[in-house]
Image (spheres, rainbow, N blue to C red):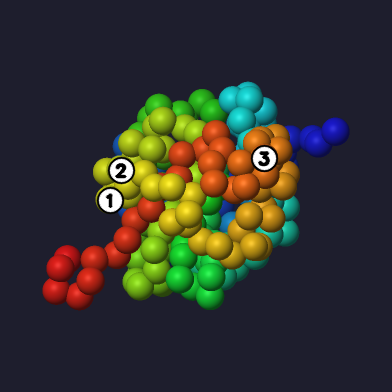
Amino acid sequence: MRTYASAVELQPIAPVSMETSNHAFTVVVATEEHTPFAQQICDEMEASAKARGTGIAKRSPEYVAQKMREGKAVIAFDAEGNWSGFCYIETWGHGEYVANSGLIVSPHLRKSGLAKRIKQKVFELSRTKYPEAKIFGLTTALAVMKINSDLGYRPVTYSELTNDEEFWKGCRSCVNFDILTAKNRTNCLCTAMLYVPPKEGNE
């Protein structure tokens, strides 16, 4: 049984770089300095999935920490410097596709608008790091679908997503994996959404 990190175990860390403050939240690109929050983030991801009764591709604290070190994650803090939310970038198909994964907001801050700000920041980071890549997501959350739609994503069939086997292996830890395999990976309970970057001159 996992134990959850307490406020005593994790001391607030001052946010750094690419700062965007609004309504007492600060959203920044994560760095090595933020790796002590990796365990807490993974615990919240798992607890949130269980509460919703939906699946999740599990990630280890070590994996999340590595994303922070690589500058491929976004983390949020409240006015007191307490961890408030997180999301990270994954690349597939040799950089042809990018996924903004693991979006999580501290339970008491949900419906505060923070999830939208985190998604906007990680979307901007993705476009900066991988300007030619298609950005996609799989989600069962209506709120995330709305945010994605506002960012320019559109609903698509699974066939328009990456065929990178490593991506689909991540679904094995999802409670709905049997549904995905039974449908030959053409459909599942998640909605697939895709952002295609505009061609030069058509921004």
Marking on residue 182: 3
Instruction: Give residue 162's position: percent from left, percent from top.
Output: 51, 61
Residue under pointer 2:
149
Identify residue type, mark 2: Ser
Relative side of 5 to 160, left or right? right
Q: Depth-wise, is mark 2 or mark 3 nearer the camera? A: 3
Q: Which callout, 2 or 3, points at the residue further toward the start of the chain?
A: 2
Residue 123 picture quarter: bottom left
Screen quadrant of the C terminus: bottom left
Mark 2 secondary-structure assignment? helix
Of 190 and 2, which appears nearest the observer?
A: 190
Instruction: Give residue 17's position: percent from left, percent from top.
Output: 41, 64
Instruction: Give residue 202's position: percent from left, percent from top.
Output: 15, 68
Q: Quick check: marks 3 and 1 in contact, CB under 8 Å?
A: no
Instruction: Determine whether 191 is above or below 74 in the image.
Output: above
Q: Depth-wise, is mark 3 or mark 1 nearer the camera? A: 3
Relative side of 20 to 11, left or right? left
Identify residue type, mark 3: Ala
